[in-house]
Amino acid sequence: MGKKINRREFLKIAGASVGGLLLTAGAVTASGKEEVRPFKPVTDGYAMLYDATLCVGCRACQNACRRANNKPAELDPTGLYDAPNDLSGDTWTLIKLYKSEDGQTWSFVKRQCMHCIEPACVAACPLGALHITPTGAVAYDKNICFGCRYCMVSCPFGVPRYEWDTTTPYIQKCDFCTSNGRLDRGEPPACVEACPTGALVFGTRSELLAEAHQRIEAHPDRYVDHVYGEHEAGGTHALYLSGVPFEDLGFPQLDEKPLPESIKIPLDYAVPSIIVGMTTFSVAAYLVTRGEEDKS
């Protein structure tokens, strides 16, 4: 039987925990977020070019992503077809269809993590669970994450997803096949390898930007004169070509300013609050659990 904790002991434990973390949080705020959680952008890492004009919507990339990352299909009500409506904890890559209101214009579009050069999610993560790998991919360490979900709020593309329906939830998103080891083995991401039409190409960011601009120059009637991800939010490692305006495909219109510069001040104050709140909750949960054990 565990030792009972009275009110005075509870206040001592909670006060010591919260007080200690307030000092730590104050140090974080005083020293500045950039010094505590620095990250070095990889400006010419591995990148992926998606050409929407070559995509036929076969979803081979979507299925390959599931297999490579051991993710189950999200079946429709009949239980026969994989039919997710959006990115989720089990769907890291998604092909969607855009149609204009008059039905005359349409395009497929691939949704996944954009792997920003200066990611807002990495800057927002208090503990470094989201981080930039040497290849430029934005990866996730579930052993560090404590579930604040700041990455979800900060991402302008709405990519990181939370496993709401599990008892041990984690953040889930594309990591350019970093966690399954394909990049370490010199293999491209599974989605790129599976694409039968050449709509997906993998290489260094500089190589793919050159390729994208060559395609636009060679076929100006086919493409919008813009490579999405070249400059948006400081640049991304997922690059897009399209024959349809990108805002019609659901892409946010962003300027060239890296997003971490915009979220620094709010996070300097919010992160300490989260740390304190989570600590208080943990102490309370522990005491409740111990109290139940004492009764048994």
Image (spheres, rainbow, N blue to C red):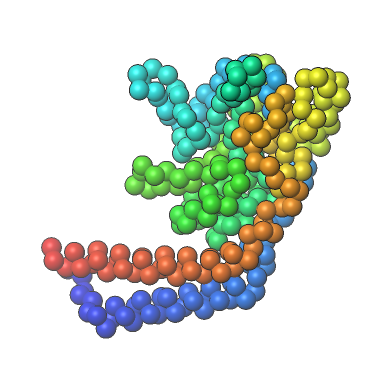
- Residue 85 appears at what percent x and percent y? 47, 30
- Residue 46 appears at what percent x and percent y? 72, 38
Work out whether residue 156 or residue 136 is closer to the camera in this orientation and state it: 156
Residue at (59% x, 64% y) in the render = 266
Total tally of numbered discs in the picture: 0
Q: Which quadrant would residue 281 be assigned to in this image?
A: bottom left
- Residue 160 appears at what percent x and percent y? 53, 44
Residue at (60% x, 19% y) in the render = 102
Answer left or right for 150 relative to 293.
right
Query: Quadrant location of the C terminus?
Result: bottom left
Work out whether residue 5 or residue 238 is closer to the camera in this orientation and state it: 238
Residue at (30% x, 64% y) in the render = 285
Answer left or right for 206 relative to 251.
right
Answer left or right for 37 relative to 232.
left
Q: Is residue 84 visible?
A: yes
- Eyeballing the image, is 223 above or below 3? above
Residue at (56% x, 69% y) in the render = 269
Q: Which quadrant would residue 232 be assigned to in this image?
A: top right
Query: Quadrant location of the N terminus?
Result: bottom left
Answer left or right for 213 relative to 202.
right
The outermost residue toward the front is: 102
- Eyeballing the image, is 228 above or below 30? above
